[in-house]
Image: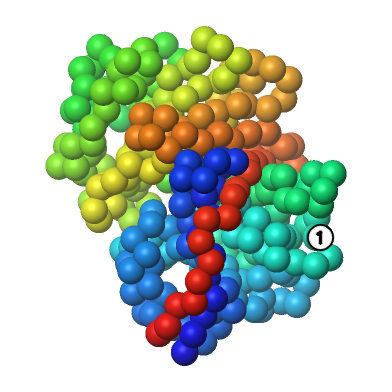
Amino acid sequence: MQFKYQVVDVFTKTRFGGNPLAVVLDADELTGTQMQVIAKEFNFSETSFVCKPKDVGNTAHVRIFTPNSEMDFAGHPNVGTAYVLAHNAGDKPTKLRFEERVGIVPITVEYDDFDNVQTTAIMSPQSLKLGNEFDPAKTARALSIKQSDIQTDSHQPTHVSVGANFIVVELKTREALARLNINSEAANQLVSSGDPKAPKAIYAYHRCEDELDWTARMFTFRGTAYEDPATGSAGGAMAAFAHHLNLPPKNGEIYKVTQGIDMGRPSAMQLQIIHQADGAKVQIAGSSIDVIQGVLTV
């Protein structure tokens, strides 16, 4: 069997920046086991698989895999997959709906004056959920920094989620953010191994002095530890948490955030709080760009 796929860089307008994503198209004939093997072969932080929707009122059924496991929800795979489907479509859709393990993910697509996809914006599937707070000293060891590098004036290191689980921690200086290095053993000691919903990723950020709201780094210690250059689900969770803490965006209604700077893959995303009947959710928006097209043989 052969399947077309595209690789795009997400949360960037520049090739080889942002977060790379492989999108496998028309993947209905693939089993979950095969999808997992393919995701491991690509070895990106995530690979998405586009299948026919179970409900014809939706755009697609999308499954998202890391090299080690399937995810309920993730930010950059949705932003990038939406870009691919909108870019390939002849009718220039402005609204998409993805069926995922977490539920329905609604997406808005914006185009420039030449009908090129400008941004894709997803809505977080959930409102803010808060979990445990974590000891700053233990969190510092997990990040290979000093406890004095952690800022606790606004909040302690805290478990937050709008669909995916993260520990968010504020750092006092940009220099401390640049020094981070995940210590997997110490990180795993932070969380309860018996809780399947315990966060297995740390999102560390520093509030910027310029027009940006913050810059961040995200490390996961689920399976093989790695740094992610752009994490929409973490940025969305942090925006919801900032709103909860009464920390509004610097300019208007949109939090402007960067990530991936220290690993040489700069990314940019825009995060906006949207009040709905079922609570405040986060719109996570960014650009994507084509890098590779190919055929996968299974």
> Residue 248, relative to residue 225: is it above or below?
above
Residue 173 as seen in the image, left or right of residue 9: left
**Measured from the top left, where is residue 255 in percent x and y?**
62, 26
The residue under the point 43% across, 19% down is 206
Q: To which quarter of the image does residue 38 belong? A: bottom left
Where is the C terminus found, in terms of image quarters?
A: bottom left
Q: Nearer the viewer, residue 25 or 189?
A: 25
Residue 110 can be seen, yes or no: yes
Residue found at x 51% / y 22%: 214
Q: Which residue of the protein is positioned furthest toward the bottom in this rendering?
A: 1
Where is residue 9? Give x, y as percent: 52, 50
**Above or below, 233 relative to 132:** below
Amino acid type for the residue under numbered disc 1:
Lys
Please say whether residue 152 is visible from this viewpoint: no
Q: Residue at x 47, y 34 (%)?
A: 266
The x and y percentages for residue 241 are 53, 30
* Mark 1 Cα-neighbour bin, 10 Å: few <14, some 14–19, many ≥20: some
Q: Which residue is mark 1?
A: 92
Q: At 30% across and 30% down in the image, what residue appears? A: 134
Res 183 quadrant in image: top left
Q: Is residue 129 left or right of residue 277?
A: left
Coloring scheme used: rainbow
Establish if 223 lies above or below 150: below
Residue 142 placement (x, y as % from top left): 21, 33
How many numbered marks does the figure carry?
Answer: 1
Q: Relative to 195, is 69 above or below? A: below
